[in-house]
Image (cartoon, helix red, strand yellow):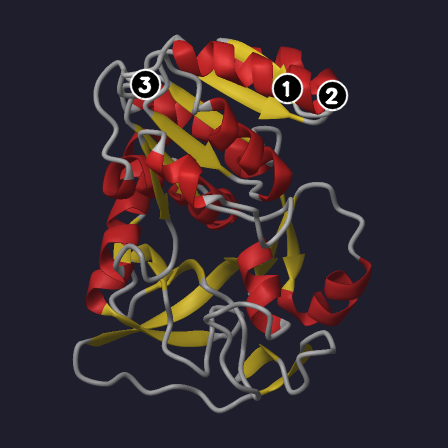
Amino acid sequence: MKAAVVTDVSKAPAYTDFPAPRPQPGELLVTVRASALSQLVRAQASGRHYTSPKPPFAPGADGVGLLEDGQRVYFAFPRNPVGAMAEQVCVQADCVVPLPDDIDDITAAAIANPGMSSWAALTERAQLQQGEGVLINGANGASGRLAIRIARHLGAGRIVVTARNTAAEADLRALGADVFIALGQEPDALQAALRAEIDKGIGVVLDYVWGSSAETIMQAATSHAPGEATQRIRFVNIGSLGGLNINLPAGLLRSTGLELMGSGLSSVSNADLVRCIGEMFKVMRHIGLEIDAVGRPLAEVEQVWTNSQDRSRVVFTL
């Protein structure tokens, strides 16, 4: 069969022949129709992600396809070494969900991973309670924008967002953000702005950035009167676009109500992540979840991988 194949993690995948998989007990064979080129897939293919397989392999974490009975489904976590950028994959039966008829292949493949990032973080990790305030750090990306409407649907009260691009404020407010904080301001001013919002009540932080902005949020959470306990804040890291490491003094944890956790592969089971995506698909039209996506033939994978100028999320089609 044809697939995008990684033989060297320093190079783009090549469209070539690769052995077709055969389902094992408990697996389903899926004929692939669409698979998104996400940051996760790029990281896995480059060998930089903690779940990266060893070459040779076909990358691709999830996609849309047909079961042997013709049912159209979303699938995730195909068995290595054959990822979703291949004509056929084998997946566990609990990592497949039916797709509503009103969601096309490209949209479903494009929105699943970024939408799941906040849905799983809020439900499986932070366990958001009705009316709690949510702070989304790095809300101007595809995942962060989806997180605003997902948080509102799941019961968030006030939604505070941060972003470096101040021109994005109007768009983020239109999606449902109540407060916008610019990350590019002076450190003391940023900490003061964050502290003011945290003092009004923030129960959950969704962090897509990590790095210095995450440090500043944690420092802002230390403001409290002597002898009083600080509010409980579940800080959920989802991404690390701002840096892989932070400076975290032990005293900061002892003097705050922060609970640090992450949300992603292995912190939530594969089956639960797919279930979250299935729940999102059921309501996405109702709550207005959208994503800019463009379809490209898988045969163009090498060209798109190295030279893509698309600002929309690329989805490979077969």
Circle on res. 186? 2
Image quadrant assignment for residue 154:
top left
- Kindly report the distance in space between the C-alpha atoms of the residues bearing marks 1 and 3: 23 Å
Name the residue at the bottom extreme: 19
Disc 1, SS: helix
Q: Are marks 1 and 3 in contact (CB under 8 Å)?
A: no
Q: Nearer the viewer, mark 1 or mark 3?
A: 1
Disc 3, SS: loop
Q: 211 above or below 19?
A: above
The residue at which mark 1 appears reads as: 190
Circle on res. 82? none
Q: Are marks 2 and 3 in contact (CB under 8 Å)?
A: no
Disc 2, SS: loop
Residue 28 in percent (x, y) is at 26, 73
Quick one: 157 or 283, which is closer to the camera?
Answer: 157
Q: Residue at x 57, y 60 (%)?
A: 317
The quadrant of the picture occupied by the C terminus is: bottom right
- Kindly report the distance in space between the C-alpha atoms of the residues bearing marks 1 and 2: 6 Å
Residue 258 in percent (x, y) is at 35, 33
Left or right of 7 on screen, residue 81: left
Circle 3: residue type: Ala
Left or right of 285 on screen, residue 125: left
- Kindly report the distance in space between the C-alpha atoms of the residues bearing marks 2 and 3: 29 Å
Residue 194 in percent (x, y) is at 53, 18
Q: Nearer the viewer, mark 2 or mark 3?
A: 2
The residue at which mark 3 appears reads as: 156
Q: Are marks 1 and 2 in contact (CB under 8 Å)?
A: yes
Name the residue at the left extreme: 26
Residue 31 in percent (x, y) is at 40, 70
